[in-house]
Structures are given as C-alpha cells and as structure tokens.
Image: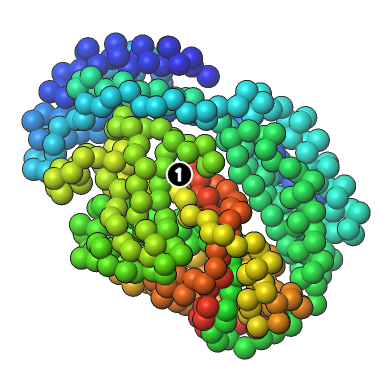
Amino acid sequence: MITKDALQALLKESLKNSPADETELVGYVSSTSLTRFAKSVIHQNVREDNSSIFARVALGKRLGVASTNRLTPEAVRLATEKATSMAKESPEQSDFPGLPKAEPAAEVAAYSAATASMTPDERADAVGRAAAVAAAGGVSVSGAYRVGKLSMAVANTSGTEQHYDATDAYLSVFATDDDGISGSAADYAIDVGDIDTEALARVAVEKCKAAANPVGIDAGNYDVILEPRATGEIMEWLNFTAFGAKQVHEGMSFMTDRIGEKVMGDLVTIYDDGTDTTGVPIPFDFEGVPKRKVTIIENGVARGPVYDSVTAAKDGVESTGHGSLSVFRGGPGCSNLFIAGGDAEFDDLLAAVKRGLLVTRFHYINGLLDTRKALFTGMTRDGTFLIENGKITKAVKNLRFNDSMLRAYSNVEAVTQKRGVAGRNWGGIGSITAPSVLIRDFRFTGTTEF
C-alpha cells in the first residue's frame, strides 16, 4: 500500500493544479484478505487491493464530483478536470456553504500490525482450530475470516489536511448439524489478538446443539432478550433511516419534528463517538472534519442527528464530522455507534422473563416500511430459544417480526453492562457496540417451518 507521506503529498500537490474555485480530494486505499470455509473446509482464499481518489470541486455554488483508481498526479489531474467540467454543467446548490476548514483530528489507536500482517496460513490455522472445536461437538462449521487495512487522507483548498491508518478483523462462525440446524457467533476488532477463535466456535457449537429439535410456537407478543448482534442489526437500520440530519430535514426520520420528545424507554441511550476505541474508530469524516461525540437518544429522549457541513449550515450549527463520501447522496451517518450499557448481568435478564424468547440475531431486516414510526420487519436466525420461568428450556422455530422500534424500545426493561462489538453489515471500517436488552411485548407476526 502507498505510504502515509506519499498519499498526503499526492493530494496536496494535486490541489495546486486544480482549475476550480474550491477543491477537495479524498484518498482511500485499502487491502482486504478473506478466507471462507464451509463444512469445516477452506474453499476460498482471496485478497483485494483497492485505491481511489475522489475529487469534489466547486465553481461558486456549482459542484462536480469525479474519481480515479490510479494513484498518479496525472490521473488525479484528469479527475479534477472532469469534476470541474461537470460543475460547469450543474445547477447551483444554494445550500453549499463552501469546503470546511478543519483543525487536525485527534490521534486514535486504530491500527494493529498483527492484523495488517496476518497471513493466509495464520487464518487457516484459526479456521482449523474452529473446525476442531466443531468436530469435538459432532458438527461442522462455516463462515469467513476477513482482515483489512486502510489508509485514508483528506485535503482541500480551505487548508484541511487529515490522515489516518486503520485495520479491522472480522470472524463469523456458523455451526451446523446434519439436520441443517445452525448456531452462530461473530466478533469484530481492530486487533486479531482480540478475537478468540475457539471461544467463538464454542458459542456457535453450543447454540447449534441447543437449537436441535426446535418446536413451533404461535406468533404473538413475547418478552424478548436480544443479544448484541440482534440489537446492532436494528441500530444499523435506524442509523440508515433516522440518525442523519438529511433524513430529519426530508421528513424520513422518526426524529423529524420530535427533537426533545420522549421516543424510547428511559434505559435507551444511543450515541456515536468516532474516537472511542471500544469500537473501531474513525477520527474524521470524508470532508476532513474531526468527529464529535453525538448523543442521538438520551434516556429515551431524541436529542438530534449527526451533521455534515451542508446539513449543519441549514440548521445554523457546526458539522459534527459525519460527512459521507461525495459520491454518496445519502447524507451524514454514524460510523462508530454505541448503545449505552446498563447495570444488569445476563442472568438478571433471564430471571426477569416468565415466558419469552432469546434471540441470537436477526436476518433480512427491512427498516423502510414506515420510517417515521421506525416500523421494521425481519426474521430470527441461528439460535432462537424459549425462556420459561427464567430458564432457557427449548429451541423454537424461527419467527418473523413486524414492529415499531419506537414502541419496542420504549419497552426496554433491563440492559446488560457487558457489550459486544459488531461490524457494519453494509461494509467499510466502522462498528456498532451494543449490550443485550430485555424488551417486553415484542411483536412477532409470522412463523416458519425451520
């Protein structure tokens, strides 16, 4: 990969030759290695290296965007000229406030040499250890072990200059028996040393064996315990539909016209913090603005969204450092999202359930049914269990839910102190850190035969 100094030098030198009034250059260079396995055997081993320079230019309030995947001065010059040509033909963006001038972002410990240098043999060894745990339990495992490293830099003609290096590692393990019953576990971290392969495999195997011979139960409202991955999957959709200022401005978000109102339960606090290494941090956004900690929901009260420079100017506030790539039109969003932990232990949650369900994770969530009500649908997957009188008693067949997450998360009764870290389903470095939660009266509307 290109070095930090070389990437920064390329962007800074290229700015001097831009024909536009204002120019922003974002360099994004990544290397991703992946080992996939099925039935306890590795079947794919790949590596992908990507390099991109994104040029955004302004001629007054006319904007143009272009990109190149070649890291040469000539390629960046051509991309900048193309963006300028596009700006000449574009309508004025009356809300464009100019490119931001930002102070240097805080340094974050987001890079692990062990992750960056992890070899295919080392990933194969980890898969072998997971397979050994599965074999001892009489099942097989499938999944993926992915490691990546990233170098990102931003420079603009307003004087903003940012750079950071990062790594991430993700391991998913699905244990499956001969009848197709599955259990799963996953972990996500900056450093591969923080991922315990055998422990994940044991969790997946234990869930698989416990999920054998599932019984069917009727659809209806149940008290549920959602494990961190299930909570994280819901929060990722809420981030997409509600947590950015553009969604609020366009009336898509449940927070539109409800800032300062109670929208969830007292135990629900949701925030984004790009410098917290409890997750996988990103210290500045794609406009080069340092990320601020933003509390979106505080003890159930909607406090407000995250901002980029354009949406911040509309509201007369400062950007919170959550701008997205210029080629993405979705507006600002969270990248290092947290759901605050509580004071409970997992056994406390179990003990509080007379009859309900434990949900390992969700599958095929759709959060676009009614975004103003945060109405979601989805299915349980890879380990759904009946809880009776504070004990997990049997596996149940998967269920489909249709429920407002505002209604559901208004019924949160207990939250664990311990949290888990999940990667973002839609890719890229970033994370969601979530506890297990006890929700009363969660609405399931359909059943399955598996």
Q: Is residue 78 visible?
A: no
- In the visual, does 266 lie left or right of 434? left
Measured as percent of width and height from the top left, residue 221 is found at 54, 84
The colour scheme of the drawn protein is rainbow
Measured as percent of width and height from the top left, residue 334 is found at 39, 47
Q: Nearer the viewer, residue 170 or 194?
A: 194
Measured as percent of width and height from the top left, residue 2 is found at 49, 16
| Quadrant of the image occupied by residue 208 | bottom right
Number of callouts in the render?
Answer: 1
Residue located at (30% from left, 48% from top)? 306
Farthest residue toward the front?
Answer: 343
Which element is circle 1 on? strand
Q: Is residue 296 visible?
A: yes
Q: Nearer the viewer, residue 86 or 366?
A: 366
Measured as percent of width and height from the top left, residue 108 is found at 47, 28
In the depicted structure, whether residue 320 falls above or below residue 223? above
Give the residue number, with chain letter if any, for mark 1.
336
Q: Which part of the image, by quadrant, shows the C terminus?
A: bottom right
| Quadrant of the image occupied by residue 9 | top left
Q: Nearer the viewer, residue 235 or 28?
A: 235
Residue located at (40% from left, 47% from top)? 272
In the depicted structure, whether residue 322 falls above or below residue 52? below
| Label 1 crowd bin: few (<14), some (14–19), many (20+), radius 10 Å | many
In the depicted structure, whether residue 396 falls above or below residue 374? below
Residue located at (20% from left, 65% from top)? 257
Residue located at (14% from left, 39% from top)? 96
Identify residue type, mark 1. Asn
